[in-house]
Image (cartoon, coloured by chain):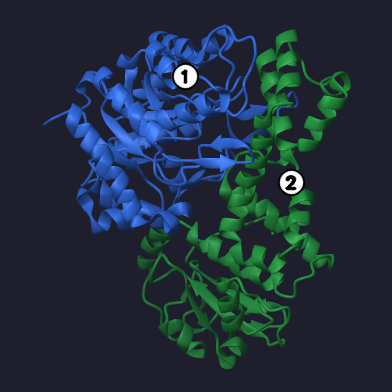
Amino acid sequence: MRDLAATPALGVGVLHNPAVPDLLAADPGLVDYVSVMPDMFWTDRGPEATPRFVELDSWIRFLDWAVGRFPLVAHSIGLSIGSAEFSDDAYVEQLGRWHQRYRFHWHSDHLSFAQVRSASGREQHAGMAVPLPFDFDVLEMVTERIRALRPRLASPFLVENAVAYLSFSDQDMNEPAFLNALARDSGCALLLDLHNLYTNARNHNFDASAFLSELDLGAVVEVHIAGGGEFAGMYTDSHSGPCPEPVWALLEEIMPRTPNLKGVTFEFHDSYFPRFGAEGVREQLTRARAVWSRYRPQ
Amino acid sequence: MSIASFQQALCDLIASPQLCLALRAKPESTLAGYQLSARERRRLLEVVWQRGMSTNCTLYRSNRVTPIYTLLTFTCRALGDQLRTLLDEFWDAREFQDGQFHSEVERFAAFLSRCIAAGGIKSPFAAELLQFELAVNALEFAPRRQILKEIVKHPALQPDTPCRLHPLARVVRFRHDPDVLLEAAARGALPSDMPEQDALVVVSVISDSAPTIVRLSDDACDALFDAAGIVEPLIPRRLPALAAAGLLVASDVAVRVSAYPSL
């Protein structure tokens, strides 16, 4: 497993979606790296199928084009590291094979669960990433899960703070304390999603800057920035357009305080691309690069 | 067990606004099947009153409809207002096991096929658009490069080589003019009815990973089909247009694409 110190600072990247290949083909200088969700590049036919993972040729074509041109990082959505009773060895092995093939600089997944196993043994997908209560027993469970996972991936492993539309009462600790303990005890690094933080702060009425003051920013290796919107009385992390100004302000706030930060990734959902447009994406990346360059001059 | 049971209960609630309402009304009986600590029970009783639970329930539905609408767009457009009712009937949270686009669409297609067979679908176009999109999906999800590598190892076809349809091709039967129907579906402007007209098209991803669609001539249809379906072996001499288009492979080519095996 590569050491974090051996991982270079990359700069500003974009999370791959079906709109990204054309953007990068037209202007390869738009980003310094590309973040990819490996899960989107194959069909998982389930544990009983042989072969289980069937790669999508039309998607792989982009990766094979990109691998020689951009540093790549992996952002998976299938580990479900917060699940109490779920693990998928074959999926982890598949991720491991992809690390060998695409030399990802780091690998991240979410501090949440998406998969549960009922008392009858049947698996059920939550349909979304569900946040965890910040309790000691949950911390212990996730710490063990990450400790077991890290040696199986060839690069540093990052955990992303989750967006949470629900709030749980009577938690053993707050989110920054949970993340700090998790990073310290499991050896993982952090992916700080500033839009998730902004969304939670806005919906649950807390101070995002106070959150950042409590968080061990030395553990942050990647930052996500994105946009969202109002939906049914809540602000949602829909990746639907440009970053709100408060997210840019949070980025400015953490840049001088994150000595191990390697990259800032802009996320947008391709379904909003027709409205957002190539120029809209370019503006966000240009602005992110300006922030990066101000704090990380070559 | 407690954390697992809490997570199970939370998933069940997110998947079912009805269960949320039941928990508000009858907490004891609604949570009776879960092994929860007092704190977990209290949390669940609180979250069903939070606005965020409604957001989660909506996002759950949105996330589940995304694969169906993405991969069966034309079919969903044909179903129109009936789609919502069908989704309510189809969505059993316990059947949602892996969150994979492919398997969710496969299950919905099987469900919809049963509804079509039972005469429960109003749209006259849903059946053929479903078959068309299943064919396209099967081909788009197929390991194309691997299959092409395998096929290129075989000798070139002779006029009388026993053949079958290329594994990266599918024949779809339409009951309405496919050109008009697919164009209308792409625009999202399907008419309420169209004159019936039998036609066969071949969908393939042989020359490019984007599907190409070729309408078969009447002669090709006669050579390709009898009342029982595709007549195999197919003989290049009798199907020159298909052979010239590279849509035939030798019968002894072992590789097959078996998407949607349950249909």
A254 to B259, vertically: above or below: above
* Residue B54 at x, y percent in the picture: 69, 35
Label 1, residues with CA under 10 Å away: few <14, some 14-19, many ≥20: few
* Marks 2 & 1, CB-CB < 8 Å contact: no
Kindly indicate whether the residues beneath marks 2 and 1 are on one polypeptide chain: no
Residue type, mark 2 in image: Trp
Indicate the colour of chain B. green
Secondary structure beneath dot 2 equals: loop
In this view of the protein, which residue sits in the foreground, B121 or A121? B121
Indicate the colour of chain A. blue
In this view of the protein, which residue sits in the foreground, B86 or A197? A197
In this view of the protein, which residue sits in the foreground, A154 or B20? B20
Q: Which mark is residue B91?
A: 2
* Residue A169 at x, y percent in the picture: 65, 13
Would residue B258 be seen by someone viewing this image from the given angle?
no
Q: CA distance from mark 2 to mark 1?
A: 39 Å
Residue that appears at 72% across and 41% down: B95
Q: Which mark is residue A207?
A: 1
Residue type, mark 1 in image: Asp
Residue that appears at 63% across and 85% down: B177
* Residue A230 at x, y percent in the picture: 56, 41
Find residue B232 and report its image quarter: bottom right
Residue that appears at 46% across and 43% down: A239
- Please report, as a chain letter, where disc 2 is located: B
Location of the C terminus of chain B (image quadrant): bottom right
